[in-house]
Image (cartoon, rainbow, N blue to C red):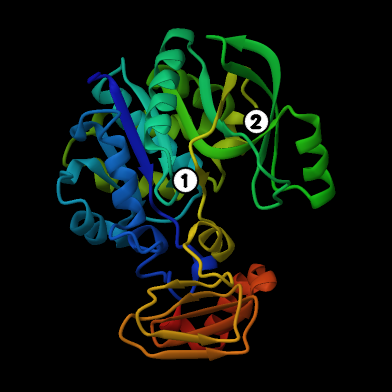
Amino acid sequence: MNKNYYAIIMAGGIGSRFWPISRTSHPKQFIDILGTGKTLIQNTYERFLKVCPKENIYVVTNENYTKLVKTQLPDMEDQQILTEPVMRNTAPCVAYGCFKIENLNPDAAIVVAPSDQQILDEDAFVNSILRSLETATANDCLVTLGIKPSRPDTGYGYIQYTDNTINEDFHKVKTFTEKPTLEIAKTFIQSGDFLWNAGIFVWSAKAIVKAFEQYLPDMHEIFADARPVYNTENERSHINQAYQQCINISIDYGVMEKADNVYVLPSDFGWSDLGTWASIYDLAEKDYVGNAVIPSEKVIMYDSSNCMVNVPGEKLVILKGLHDFIVVESNNTLLICPRDQEQNVKQVVADVKSKFGAKYI
């Protein structure tokens, strides 16, 4: 196993679209949301054990989740858990992890990925990551993984690529587009040169540090100034101050959309970003009338179809005459919502917070 290969798992989000299962104090990456026996972050960590040595895997998370990470990933040492004092989107998170690793090993090649994705074909995933690490190292470029789209989905970002390639399969990126309208998504699919943006990035430490210097110079300065304290006892206090100076910006918008050395690897490994209850419903086992029930031991359904049900295992639940609904209970909270209106859950969470405070959030 290549000791210059590293992985950074981004695990700082609060997953509000999965409320009330996902809460600020215990967000979705720390939940076995698919009923597999392992949480999303545990599955992600185990995938990267096939890519690099376990001591080369880092988790970046909110400092409030440090205990959850330690509990769920007991093999991780304290110095592998990087804590953020405030949420500042993905660019500072990536900068912190990559500058720290570069300080430790200037020859490092790094994969950065979210903690809450579903990957069905792990062998294909590992193969794509290893090829990307090799290509990024040899060509001093920034690599992102694109998923071959199966439908015109408006919930994903899209990457347009050209016929200009390196290593045969890595295509030069032409444009990034955030979540499009349905009509635009349809034209993307028809054109045949667009991929879903999986939010998985691969680069050498040198290349990403150089990219920060070029495209986010203020942020580069903040994390370059921290070089004397990385991997020392003063790291955390210094980073806590550094984050206060960081702007709130994504790595996509801050670097990837501006850089001229970005390549995408078209990939197909059974990917889902698990961003909504619809994505869970699509992946879950269903009965003959389309109901997905997790767990299913004490749920009885009459004349009901195409429902997504997630309730406490000890609770007896009877549903009758319900079609195309989401039924979720957790944290002394019950949510019943039509499946085609789940995009309103974020607004519901905001309304609950304003009416009842943070108790149910």
Image location of residue 160, percent across then percent down: 71, 29
For the residue marked with disc 2, what is the amino acid?
Glu
Residue 339 sits in which quadrant?
bottom right
Report the front residue among 328 and 35.
35
Above or below, comparing residue 23 to residue 5 in the picture? below
Residue 277 sits in which quadrant?
bottom right
- Residue 273 can be seen in this image: yes
For the residue marked with disc 1, what is the amino acid?
Gln
Above or below, comparing residue 250 to residue 163 in the picture? below
Which residue: 71% across, 18% down? 162
Residue 257, disc? 2
Which residue: 73% across, 46% down? 152
Report the front residue among 177 and 316.
316
Residue 245, disc? 1
Image location of residue 210, percent across then percent down: 48, 19
Q: Residues within 10 Å of mark 2 (few under 14, many from 20)?
A: some
Report the front residue among 84 and 339.
339
Q: Nearer the viewer, mark 2 or mark 1?
A: 2
Q: Is residue 219 left or right of residue 342?
A: left
Q: Secondary structure at mark 1?
A: helix
